């Protein structure tokens, strides 16, 4: 397999800062496209993985799965894209394509494990995949998305993970008019969840630990805001919500958020803290509540979400950073000091 060397940013160990590295990318195969990466969002999963908080990180690790750019090369069998097109890549770059889940278009739940954009298995090179903190990426066209031309490109990048990871469960649990929906944790995922749930027609309740986000919540589209550190507010809103999307990245008391659900309500976890979250039996039993989870979204759902965002003019609220500032950005992300997504301007990697 022919390969090329490209510049990237990554880390050699859980406790080390990210720094510039060189990585190998395969040359385009028949069905591949090569994308010059213009912007890459910074997801909390990047930080969890770089620091091996979920175990299993293979080093060197190059994070980044909110990728937008322009196609610079196409293989001879590519039909959906041409050189010069805008294109995007999210959290997965392949799947087995044969299992029950793949066949029904739910590649994210591939029974053989989808191939993650980073820290997955690059089957052609037989090594780990490297993510979007890099100059270029080569991906099979079936896992590449079309980008609406009317949206700000940098602010579109976070849709590729934060957007679809909130879109998919909101759709799955039929969020729409007549539903009261809580979004917990207003970071990258949460702020997209608020915008999308509102655009879907739901009554949206923001549930935050940050007094500084109470004001912002309305601008993002919230109808109500609960400060979760205020027990009085939590009690006053007990058993009022049909659905809760939990986007929290750190340890937290899920029982407190379950208490907000009505009978038969569902709390879907998308946040993925390092340690297990204890659930009290009586948070579920007396009200037949459901405690669920959801991972990213399928390729079809990702395209559907991008098209919806194009039609409704929805993008992420971002702070653009240079690649060289990624370590400072990680520290700020841990403190919740970003409104609401860092996006890396990849031109900075060329310097
Ligand atoms: P983020 O931008 O850091 O946002 C996390 C938010 O959680 C914070 O802004 C904060 O919101 C809240 N929070 C933090 N610590 C908390 C605590 N101790 N108690 C209560 N709330 C707390 O992270 P993100 O990029 O949105 O990612 C969120 C989580 O989703 C991460 O664990 C990430 O790995 C995971 N994720 C999962 C999937 C999936 O497929 N399921 C995909 C992408 C990401 P407030 O200030 O409003 O309280
Ligand atoms: Zn992500
Ligand atoms: Zn499969």
Image: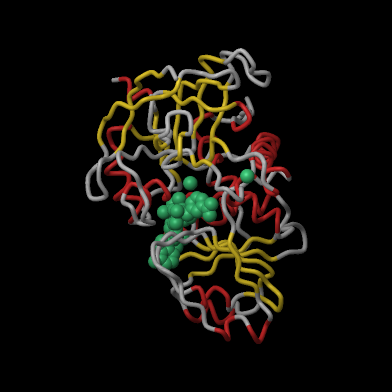
Q: Residue at x 61, y 29 (%)?
A: 147
With 256 as the anchor, is 284 left or right in this view? right
Q: Which image quarter: residue 156? A: top right
x%, y% of residue 93? 54, 35
User: Relative to 112, does residue 137 appear above or below in the rendering?
Assistant: above
Mark yes or no: residue 190 visible: no
x%, y% of residue 197? 66, 54
x%, y% of residue 177? 77, 58
The scheme the figure's colours follow is secondary structure
x%, y% of residue 94? 56, 36
Q: Residue at x 31, y 37 (%)?
A: 10
Which corner quadrant holds the N terminus?
Answer: top left
User: Relative to 116, does residue 248 appear above or below in the rendering?
Assistant: below
- Total tally of numbered discs in the picture: 0
For the residue pair 81 and 248, the one nearer the viewer reads as 81
Mark yes or no: residue 72 visible: yes
User: Relative to 310, does residue 24 appear above or below in the rendering?
Assistant: above
With 335 as the anchor, is 26 left or right in this view? right
Which corner quadrant holds the C terminus?
Answer: top left
Q: Which image quarter: residue 312? A: top right
Q: Residue reaching furthest left?
A: 16
Q: Residue at x 77, y 63 (%)?
A: 178
């Amino acid at each position: 397999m022919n390969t090329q060397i490209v510049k990237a940013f990554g880390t050699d160990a859980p406790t080390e800062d990210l720094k510039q590295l060189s990585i190998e990318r395969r040359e385009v195969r028949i069905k591949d496209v090569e994308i010059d990466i213009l912007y890459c969002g910074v997801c909390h999963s990047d930080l969890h993985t770089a620091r091996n908080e979920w175990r299993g990180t293979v080093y060197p690790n190059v994070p980044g799965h909110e990728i937008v750019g322009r196609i610079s090369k196409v293989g001879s069998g590519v039909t959906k894209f041409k050189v010069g097109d805008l294109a995007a890549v999210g959290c997965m770059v392949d799947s087995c394509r044969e299992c029950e889940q793949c066949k029904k278009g739910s590649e994210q739940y591939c029974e053989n494990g989808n191939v993650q954009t980073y820290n997955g298995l690059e089957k052609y090179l037989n090594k780990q995949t490297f993510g979007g903190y890099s100059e270029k990426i080569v991906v099979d066209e079936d896992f590449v998305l079309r980008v609406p031309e009317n949206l700000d490109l940098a602010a579109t990048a976070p849709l590729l993970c934060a957007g679809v990871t909130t879109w998919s469960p909101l759709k799955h649990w039929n969020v729409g008019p007549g539903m009261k929906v809580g979004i917990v944790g207003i970071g990258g995922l949460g702020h997209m969840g608020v915008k999308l749930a509102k655009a879907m027609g739901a009554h949206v309740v923001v549930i935050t630990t940050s007094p500084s986000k109470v004001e912002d919540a309305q601008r993002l589209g919230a109808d109500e805001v609960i400060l979760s550190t205020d027990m009085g507010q939590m009690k006053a809103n007990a058993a009022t919500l049909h659905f809760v999307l939990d986007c929290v990245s750190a340890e937290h008391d899920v029982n407190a958020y379950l208490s907000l659900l009505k009978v038969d309500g569902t709390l879907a976890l998308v946040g993925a803290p390092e340690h297990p979250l204890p659930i009290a039996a009586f948070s579920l039993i007396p009200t037949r509540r459901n405690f669920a989870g959801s991972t990213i979204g399928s390729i079809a759902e990702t395209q559907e979400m991008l098209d919806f965002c194009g039609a409704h003019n929805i993008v992420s609220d971002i702070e653009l950073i240079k690649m060289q500032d990624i370590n400072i950005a990680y520290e700020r992300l841990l403190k919740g000091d970003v409104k609401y997504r860092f996006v890396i301007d990849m031109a900075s990697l060329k310097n």
